[in-house]
Image (tube, rainbow, N blue to C red):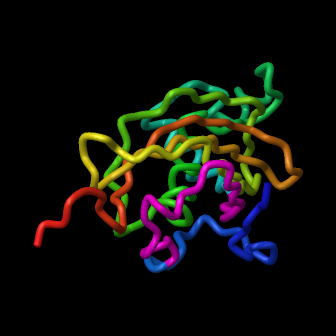
Amino acid sequence: MEIKTDGSTGCKPTAEAPSPGAAPTDRYFEDYVAGEVLEFGCVTLDEADMIAFARRFDPQPFHTDPAAAKKSVYGGLIASGWYTASQAMRLLVDHFVSREASLGSPGVDELRWLKPVRPGDTLSLRVTVLDAQRSQSKPDQGSIRVFAEARNQHGEVVMTMKSVGFIRCREQLGPSKE
């Protein structure tokens, strides 16, 4: 199994978004191959951003209050799992999902938070294409199933996700419409 990276081994972790042109623009269904593994991106998590997100969407004390979090079973502030998932989604969109060919997703099949994520952690993503099936009823598209692993700066897997995406095909099968 070949692992492809985006060359970000010297990545400067940042909470800033990459340039809009960072995502693949010419990748179509035919380019997503079952068994392909890609590693890319990095984002360093900011404490204030984590707390602001949690206050709005997941206001539990170990996500919003550093003093209370120290007294919790986590021994300190941790990111909401939903914040971690949103950061992973941003990395997927910036580095994996084609801006030209993505047709959205019917959803996530499985989402697991395996280890606490803390302020200052740097996350990257490893994505494995599990399956790629061309649609029988819509010959201009296919679906891909992927397994994504968010890893921290120590290489520990902190979150996993299995999901499906619909992708436009470069070439349409079937009779010519000339």
Q: Position of residue 128 (x, y in %)?
A: 66, 48
Q: Position of residue 77 (x, y in %)?
A: 72, 36
Residue 122 visible in rendering: yes
Q: Is residue 37 left or right of residue 26?
A: right
Asked if the magenta segment contains residue 28, the reply would be yes
Give above or below for 134 relative to 111. below
Q: Position of residue 94 (x, y in %)?
A: 51, 65
Q: Which residues are magenta?
A: 22-44
Give above or below for 99 relative to 113. below
Q: State which quarter of the image contains the C terminus.
A: bottom left
At x 43% / y 37%, what residue is drawn?
56
Asked if the magenta segment contains residue 78, the reply would be no
At x 73% / y 66%, what residue is drawn?
4
Foreground pick, 25 / 72 = 25
Q: Position of residue 59 (x, y in %)?
A: 51, 28
Q: State which quarter of the image contains the N terminus.
A: bottom right
At x 70% / y 46%, what residue is drawn?
150
